[in-house]
Image (spheres, grey):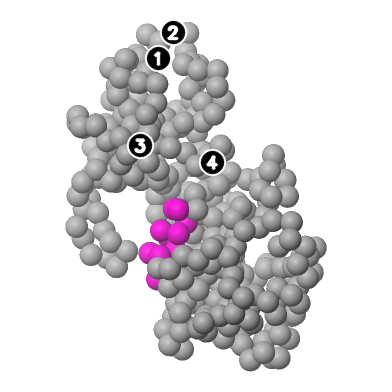
């Protein structure tokens, strides 16, 4: 999949396009991307996504912006796995937010991307003060010769699938609910970086997985499985939070104690799948008390994984194993 920063002044090939933030690439997004890729294949064109960085709500109200479900890198990997050919990552800033809807159509859709067919969600608005809507896009399509389709919101078991619903489920620690909306277990990917080695001092060495955003969508202690260390996933117990017993710094961390793993993995890019919540994060009276609880958590995670999970071969986006 090709990733392009920004929009060219003049497209060099036509496209079937969809537009959105695609945070988490949940089942509603997946259904929209299936329409996109099927239409692109039928027309013999590229399936193209236009997305934004940062998220518009992060730009307008950073203190009140929702937790990210996925970093930009994770989102791009999920889009590639959905069969998208090209993604344009457009910087959302003051100039972009102030762009009149007609300029968005003329400069981006028509000249910059040469759209031949456009799919949008049923709540999509665009341009300054969100003045652009579906009716305006339909009118532009008739003028410039591209089709426009709106996809209704997907429901699962009577619930509207949305990134907000996934965030709510994760915040409540309901991983099964989040997985139903996502179509997979929730996961976080990141590179292993050096930490303060506290876990090693306590007898439970951890992989410190770098978080790209300051507000993760979940917190607590979890049974997990981890990709990136070989052909099989590795089980473990993970803590994601601010570690109140060990530090006063309120920056969250993701630390994973890998079961039956003795090798160094600094620099490895891991994906941590959150399978079962064991407890909320809490502050202990001493490091010895924390060490005792970590042992309890590790035993509980091992028991849960032995009962409900098993290692599986890694799969490529096209379904091949290995």
Question: Which of labels 1 and 4 is toward the front?
Answer: 4
**Mark number for residue 213?**
4
Q: Position of residue 105 (x, y in %)?
A: 69, 78
**Residue 259 in which image quadrant:** top left
Question: Which of labels 3 and 2 is toward the front?
Answer: 3
Give whichever of discs 4 and 3 has the lower sequence position: 3
Give whichever of discs 2 and 4 has the lower sequence position: 4
Evaluate if marks 1 and 4 touch, with contact meaning CB atoms under 8 Å apart.
no
Give whichever of discs 1 and 3 has the lower sequence position: 3
Please give the residue where the numbered disc 3 appears in the rendered image: 192
Mark 2 Cα-neighbour bin, 10 Å: few <14, some 14–19, many ≥20: few
Evaluate if marks 2 and 4 touch, with contact meaning CB atoms under 8 Å apart.
no
Please give the residue where the numbered disc 1 appears in the rendered image: 290
Quadrant containing the C terminus is bottom left
With 72 as the anchor, is 302 left or right in this view? left
Evaluate if marks 2 and 1 touch, with contact meaning CB atoms under 8 Å apart.
yes
Q: Position of residue 111 (x, y in %)?
A: 63, 81
With 253 as the anchor, is 315 left or right in this view? left
Height in image: 269 above or below 101?
Answer: above
* Residue located at (28% from left, 17% from top): 203
**Residue 207 in which image quadrant:** top left
Kindly tell me whether residue 56 is visible in this rendering: yes
Q: Position of residue 256 (x, y in %)?
A: 35, 32
Q: Position of residue 162 (x, y in %)?
A: 57, 57
* Residue located at (65% from left, 70% from top): 122
Please give the residue where the numbered disc 2 appears in the rendered image: 286
Give whichever of discs 3 and 2 has the lower sequence position: 3
Give whichever of discs 1 and 4 has the lower sequence position: 4
């Amino acid at each position: 999949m090709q990733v392009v920063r920004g929009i060219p002044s003049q497209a060099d090939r036509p496209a079937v396009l969809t537009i959105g933030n695609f945070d988490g690439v949940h089942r509603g997004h997946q259904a929209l991307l299936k329409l996109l890729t099927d239409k692109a294949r039928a027309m013999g064109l590229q399936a193209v996504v236009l997305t934004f960085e940062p998220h518009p709500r992060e730009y307008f109200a950073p203190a009140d912006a929702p937790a990210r479900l996925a970093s930009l890198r994770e989102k791009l990997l999920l889009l590639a796995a959905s069969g998208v050919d090209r993604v344009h990552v457009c910087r959302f800033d003051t100039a972009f937010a102030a762009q009149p809807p007609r300029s968005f159509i003329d400069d981006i859709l028509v000249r910059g991307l040469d759209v031949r067919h456009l799919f949008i969600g049923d709540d999509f608005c665009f341009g300054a003060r969100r003045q652009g809507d579906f009716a305006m896009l339909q009118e532009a399509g008739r003028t410039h010769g591209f089709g426009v389709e709106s996809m209704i919101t997907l429901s699962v078991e009577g619930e509207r699938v949305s990134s907000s619903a996934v965030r709510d489920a994760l915040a409540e620690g309901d991983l099964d609910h989040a997985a139903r909306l996502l179509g997979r277990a929730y996961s976080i990917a990141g590179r292993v970086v050096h930490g303060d080695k506290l876990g090693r001092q306590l007898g439970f060495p951890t992989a410190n997985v770098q978080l790209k955003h300051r507000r993760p969508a979940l917190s607590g202690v979890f049974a997990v499985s981890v990709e990136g260390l070989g052909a099989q996933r590795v089980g473990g117990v993970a803590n994601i939070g601010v570690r109140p017993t060990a530090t006063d710094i309120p920056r969250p961390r993701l630390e994973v104690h890998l079961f039956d793993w003795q090798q160094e993995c600094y620099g490895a890019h891991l994906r941590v799948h959150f399978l079962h919540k064991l407890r909320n994060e809490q502050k202990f009276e001493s490091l010895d008390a924390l060490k005792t609880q970590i042992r309890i958590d590790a035993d509980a995670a091992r028991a849960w994984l032995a009962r409900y999970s098993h290692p599986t071969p890694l799969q490529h986006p096209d379904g091949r194993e290995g």
